[in-house]
Image (cartoon, helix red, strand yellow):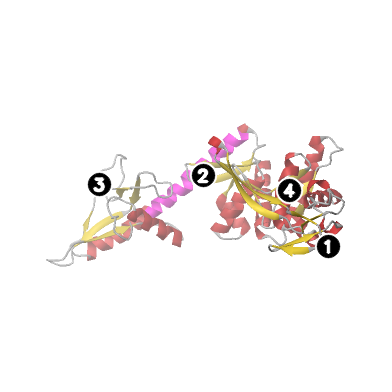
Amino acid sequence: MGGLLLRTEEPIYEAEKVFKGRAGFSSNTRPYHLYVLKREKDSFRIGGHEYVGYSEEHLDARGGRGKSKAKMILNFIEQNRDKAWYSTEIAEALKEKGVKVSDIMANVKRYERKGLVYVRGYRLHDRQTPFRNGYLITWIDQSKPRDKAVEEAIERTSAVLEERSSTNPIIQRVHSIRDAIVESTKLRDLVSFSFLQDKLDCTEYEAETAVVRALQLYPDLKEVKLFGAYRYYYLASMDEADLNAATEMKKNYICLTKGSANRIGHNWEAVPEWFIDRFTTGARFWTQEHRTAGMDSRRITIHLVKSIRGRISNAEVDRVWEVTPGLFAQPITYVLSCKWGLVRKSDVDDFLDVLRWSKDFGVDTPDGR
């Protein structure tokens, strides 16, 4: 307009809510400017807004009339195509140009849909989540065959994960897990969770976290659960005949070793039972008839009102007995559960949850179950 108009220096943002019928409402934030006729001054303030004339420093980057943040992000990725970058690293590199962390993925997702960049994170069953430092992002070379370009992009992101392994214990454990599974597969064998935990020399929780991450990062790692409880791992490339043979051998091993452990556990159940029978006056043990022949009648099946860690409708406790301490006193009920091995806090919590949510012992109160 030949310098006859002045425009607000900063855009004004206004939330807009549009009804989309069956799709519901769509919410957007729309930026716009206000204009006034220029008079004597080149700039002045009205209603809390500063009005200015045309200048390069006030140039609106939208519409391609300036260098937008989206273009700066794409140029950075393309110019550094020989490496993969975390989204936080890109934001840090472009911080002086006004680019924020929130700007990165909003624009990178568009470029990913166009096939210009490769984005990598933790792969879950139905979604992808960022690493601790954000998503890994790298350029896809458009001049090469598509499969080759994507393969190179994956290798660049893997190289970055390798570099960070020395400072990230989870990644170190993930790599150790994969190496152990690859080794066992080459030997036509399965590797157990307990073996992996011992190899990693960490807690059960840390090993569990690392195994979950390994299965997310490497889709060719597979898990098989024997007898619904014992977890083993192998590579998807393992021959089916070798897999079946290894599975049968592990089943035989479990039957031998765990059967022995169960017998030892049953002996431990008999120890407190003997002392209670011998030294506790007026103790009366609960008994049940079981469908399984040879099952001790003093092992009690209790019914659950909700599932507890894989137990759908019932659970077993090793002994239940009642003691009446006096003529006019109410009987006290005791419940015993034996565990062969180290007893952890999670085992105690599990035992108490079974009692809480059982029809036999749990009750509803104003303060909860």
Which residue corresponds to the image point at 73% horizontal and 48% vertical from the top-left?
107
Tell me if residue 249 is in the magenta stretch.
yes
> Pointer 4: what residue?
107
Residue 266 appearing in the image: yes
Say above or below: 149 vs 355.
above
> Pointer 1: what residue?
40
Say above or below: 341 vs 189.
below
Q: Position of residue 10 (x, y in %)?
A: 74, 58
| Distance Cα–Cα, label 2 vs label 1 | 94 Å
Image quadrant in which you'd find residue 45: bottom right
Q: Indicate which disc, 4 or 2, sits on the residue closer to the N terminus.
A: 4
| Distance Cα–Cα, label 1 vs label 3 | 100 Å
In the visual, does 227 lie left or right of 140? left
Q: Secondary structure at mark 3?
A: loop
Which residue corresponds to the image point at 61% horizontal and 60% vertical from the top-left?
201
Q: Position of residue 256 (x, y in %)?
A: 47, 45
Look at the magenta stretch and give its main secondary structure.
Answer: helix
